[in-house]
Amino acid sequence: MTPRERRRPARVTGAGERLDAPTAHDPAVLERSLGHVSAINRWLGGWRSLLRHLPAFLPAEGPARLLDVGTGSGEAAVVAAKWARRQGRELRITATDANPAILEIARRRTANYPEIRVEPADALALPYPDGAFHAAMLTLTLHHFEGDAAVQVLRELARVARGGIVVSDLDRSWANYLGARLLSWTLWAPNPLTRHDGPLSVLRSYTRSELLALAAAAGLRDARVHRHLFERLVLTASGSAAPRPPWPDTPATR
């Protein structure tokens, strides 16, 4: 840990976020909470930093395949789809989550994008062959995992991604934490999920050194952590480089 990181809040472990609880949430409250997450990505550099690194792991020409793990509302997949359309690229995206209620929200939010299919998947054991995708991305999700589980998530991403992986998350900094606390008292106050989980998400997030340590434990190749505006960290690493299997000609799960 660097001297700068020693001045950051201590990482909280063993305290789960309400979003991860097995109990069912009110659908309207859940959807609004996921909307708050999307707003953080939209206004505080999440999508810009994602698109800064993702194209490097996609083929320069021809169709490409992208996996979005922990898709939430599906907006990361939509952002990637819009980018591909602007570029005149064919990008087929599989957006996954383990929570059935969240998957329903993602299906509705991505209904106008036939290039996106939404389906259930466990980030700890992705149901795809090695190298099935050119790239895999994980946005504001890694901090939901600790220790060996976080390492396993990174291993699974790299295993199924032929080109590389992009993992975007919060930096555990006082600026992020105080900002989240302020929002929990104001804009997020009416929503019990975001009011509780927002500040805790920051305290469960990883620093640059911690991300690099997780990447090393996962055996990732060419791992780098990039720092972006608004206290955002992006971990990139090479993928499996395994031959990709044929894409199944099955309709999207919606």
Image (cartoon, rainbow, N blue to C red):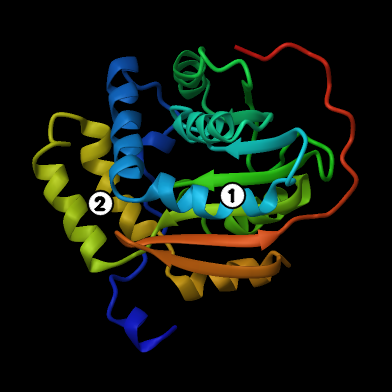
Label 1 packing within 10 angstroms: few (<14), some (14-19), many (20+):
many
Q: Quadrant of residue 243?
A: top right
SS at mark 2 in the image: helix
Whether residue 55 is situated above or below residue 89 in the rendered picture:
below
Residue at image x 50%, y 28%? 78
Give me the residue at 59% from left, 33% from top.
84
Of the numbered discs 2 and 1, the one sitting upstream in the chain is: 1
Whether pointer 2 and pointer 1 mark residues with C-beta atoms closer than 8 Å, the reply is no
What's the CA distance linking mark 2 and mark 1?
A: 27 Å
Q: Which mark is residue 207?
A: none
Q: Nearer the viewer, residue 206 or 21?
A: 206
Residue 104 lies, in percent from the top left, at 49, 15
Which residue corresponds to mark 2?
A: 199
Q: Is residue 171 above or below residue 116?
A: below
Q: Give the residue at x 28% y 70%.
A: 9
Q: Position of residue 128 (x, y in %)?
A: 78, 35
Given the image, on which type of amino acid does mark 1 rest? Leu
Image side of residue 119 versus residue 235, left or right? right
Q: Does 38 sit left or right of 175 as displayed?
A: right
- For the question of whether residue 89 can be seen, the reply is yes
The quarter of the rendered structure image containing the C terminus is: top right
Of tags 2 and 1, the one toward the viewer is 1
**Residue 233 occupies quadrant:** bottom left
237 left or right of 228? right
Figure label count: 2
Identify the disc placed on residue 54: 1
Q: Nearer the viewer, residue 160 or 82?
A: 82
